[in-house]
Image (tube, rainbow, N blue to C red):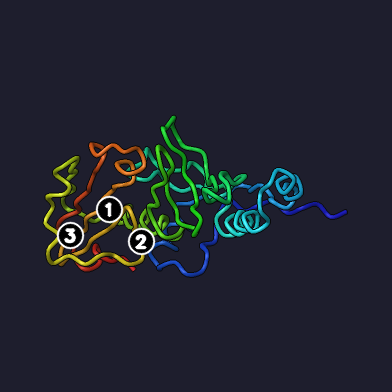
Amino acid sequence: MTAALPVSPIPVAPAGLTRRARRFVEVEGIRIPRQGIGRHRDAWIRHGIPAAEIDRVAAFQDRWGGLALPPAPFYEGGPRILDADIPEGSAAESWLIPVGDCRVSMAYGFMIGPGDEFGIHGSRWAPLHASTDGWVESLALAAHARRWAKTITRTTGKAVDSLDLDGYEQVPEVQGLTDTWWRDKDSLIAVYRGEAVGLDAPQCLEAHVYGGLDEWGLHGG
């Protein structure tokens, strides 16, 4: 029997990401062996998990499973490793898929929603981005903005709703839902509403303003 080849720790970015995000995944990320889903399929079906939900877990693992990325600037850094597990919920309430353990003890978990949205579930479900691609794009953009911004300003609570976004355009590649990114001629703004929504805690609302960016700083590929 031929021994299985070891998994390379250098990840290959999935197709469909921006050049900036591909570079982030392949330079900053680490790939570790991921758990196979096939061996759990029969047991999960016996526990009432629909086959379609198990297929979603397998699809996530194929694209993202085993990928460790640098900490996010919010949500206490995000999942330590992207790694899907047994779906939670029901047909009546919809199914959520856990996608990685938190780096520290948190009041919520990171989940994939019924439409493959990436989000958090605390007191309730808060979809942050329309897909995991959007989450990874947001991490890549934050890392890029931190590197090139001349100023970084953190705003919290009610002050976030007072930010003047007139003249800004929403950054499409992050696929923002509860969380959004905004771009104008020399700055980027990341608005993090997930904890405020998912924990019903408006005081957790936060925004990061990256100022003094040139064309490369605003886009970076």
Which element carries disc 2, helix, strand or loop? helix
Binning the other alpha carbons within 10 Å of mark 1 as few (below 14), some (14 to 19) or many (20 upward) gives: few
**Among the two numbered marks 2 and 3 on one chain, the one whose residue lies closer to the N terminus:** 2
Q: Nearer the viewer, residue 178 or 143?
A: 178
**Could you tell me residue 167's position as x and y percent?**
13, 67
Residue type of the residue flagged with mark 1: Arg
Marking on residue 174 = 2
**Among the two numbered marks 3 and 1 on one chain, the one whose residue lies closer to the N terminus:** 1
Mark 2 → mark 3, Cα distance in angstroms: 16 Å
**Could you tell me residue 62's position as x and y percent?**
61, 59
Marking on residue 156 = none
Q: Which residue is mark 3?
A: 187
Which element carries disc 1, helix, strand or loop? helix
**Could you tell me residue 43's position as x and y percent?**
75, 44
**Could you tell me residue 83's position as x and y percent?**
57, 47
Q: Residue at x 84, y 55 (%)?
A: 2
Q: Residue at x 11, y 56 (%)?
A: 164
Q: Nearer the viewer, residue 179 or 49?
A: 49
Q: Residue at x 15, y 67 (%)?
A: 185
Residue type of the residue flagged with mark 2: Val
Decide if residue 159 is on the left or right side of residue 29.
Answer: left
Q: Would you place residue 118 above or below residue 73 in this image?
A: below
Residue type of the residue flagged with mark 3: Ser
Q: Which residue is mark 1?
A: 147
